[in-house]
Amino acid sequence: MSASHAIVSVAEHAKLEAFVDADAAAAFLGITRRTLLQKVRTGKLPGHPVDPAAEKKDWRFLLSELNASMLSCELRPPGALKPSRRV
């Protein structure tokens, strides 16, 4: 690996956003952890399970995705439903 390649990799790594746990995500949104997890399970908010195959999921969140999701809610007309994000 060349030195310039290593510098690019470090620079790209610095741009990555850290995942946060449910407590931090709930505090960011100003809701309870329970409400956050209910909304994630129903697809109303984006979340990433640590182990998708686990029966009881441990979720992680990107604050930028939560922020974008909340902003998109403000732009929808009254009564419009948000499409499900569940896969």
Image (cartoon, rainbow, N blue to C red):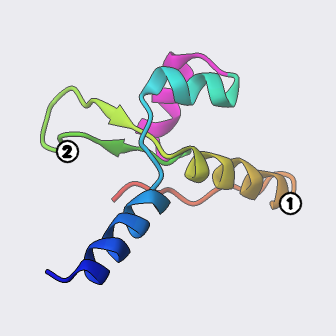
Q: Nearer the viewer, residue 4 or 11?
A: 4
Name the side, left or right, on which 32 lies relative to 57: right
Q: Which SS class for mark 1?
A: loop
Q: Amino acid at mark 2?
A: Pro
Is disc 2 placed on a helix, strand or loop?
A: loop
Residue 36, magenta (yes or no)? yes
Image side of residue 85 versus residue 60, left or right? right
Q: Which mark is residue 21?
A: none
Q: Bounds of the magenta span?
A: 31-43
Q: Which residue is mark 2?
A: 52
| Residue 57 % position (x, y) | 25, 31
Residue drawn at x 34%, y 73% is 7
Q: Is residue 84 magenta?
A: no
Q: CA distance from mark 2 to mark 1?
A: 33 Å
Give the residue drawn at x 65%, y 52%: 69
Q: Which residue is the site of mark 1? A: 77
Image quadrant occupied by the N terminus: bottom left
Q: Residue 66 placed where, x, y %? A: 60, 46
Is 87 or 65 nearer to us in this picture?
Answer: 65
